[in-house]
Image: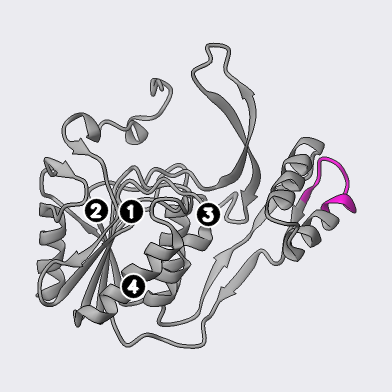
Amino acid sequence: MSQQYLPARKQLTDHLSMDYKPKKLACKVTDKTFLIRFPSCGGNDPNMEWIEESIELYQQSGCANLIIDLRGNSGGQDQFYEPYLKLLYDHPGLTEGVEFLNTVANRNAFEQLSQMNGNPEWLESRLEKCRESANGSFVLFGDSLTTIEYDSIYEKPIKAAIIIDKYVMSSGEQMLLEIQATSDRTIIYGRDNTMGCLDFSNVRPAAELPNGKGTLAVPTTRSCRLPNNGIDETGIQPDVRITLPLPELLSDNVDDWVIWVAADLEN
């Protein structure tokens, strides 16, 4: 797909200078630090079974520190990152809600989603709220600010790191925001900011492009961060900038960036 209309910050070119194929991985880096590479929130590869298994492997490893490598995670569904959020959680935090643009087309897509998932009560209650609201209005599901709070705090990891790159977007970025809000033991590492593709979300297919090479999708929701605290223009910046060159290979391997982050955590 052409990137000629994207600002320079958002142009995706790293894969041209490296073998860029991030794959799921759960393994020790050192005796003190464990790595989980989590390249997608799509729910297929990795699926929820593997996500939970990766956490079990970490907990059995005896490692005090944990790296979660998000490079390449372009999003999917928030539910698939929640086990990692619970693992890193150490205090309650706030997250912004979204407003749904209540149009016939958006509502039809929402109804199809509900039917595909067996008409769950939480989806049906949101649909009912849309049906009771005016066409063209924005419907807020819940509160504009929601508290994230869990019943327990895991003793480990003692220190945690998340590695990002500009290919992280959508649910991958939401995961970062929620971890920033709830985990003081987690540091974000990266060379670049994330993509910035979250202020408008929950897209639905709208039309096939005339050349047959793509599908036009439109967002159905907007974040309550707007208009003053959006992230799409800037992305999410790392706490620590990685100054190393790009690795030659990013797949299911322990690359130079991971080794560098592990050493920094262990200092």
Say which mark, if any, is on residue 55.
Answer: 4
Please indicate whether residue 172 sits to the left or right of residue 139 in the image: left
In-front residue for pair 225/92: 92
Left or right, 229 with respect to 136, comes to left
Left or right: where does residue 242 sit relative to residue 127? left
Say which element carries label 1.
Answer: loop
**Residue hosting label 2:** 190
Looking at the rendering, the stretch of residues picked out in magenta corresponds to 130-138
Query: Is 232 placed above or below 229 here?
Result: above
Q: CA distance from mark 1 to mark 3?
A: 22 Å
x and y percentages locating residue 232 in the rendered image = 47, 44
Q: Residues within 10 Å of mark 3 (few under 14, many from 20)?
A: some
Amino acid identity at mark 3:
Gln
Distance CA(mark 4)–CA(mark 2): 23 Å
Q: CA distance from mark 2 to mark 3?
A: 23 Å
Mark 1 — residue?
A: 237
Q: Nearer the viewer, mark 3 or mark 4?
A: 4
Which residue sits at x=40%, y=20%?
A: 2
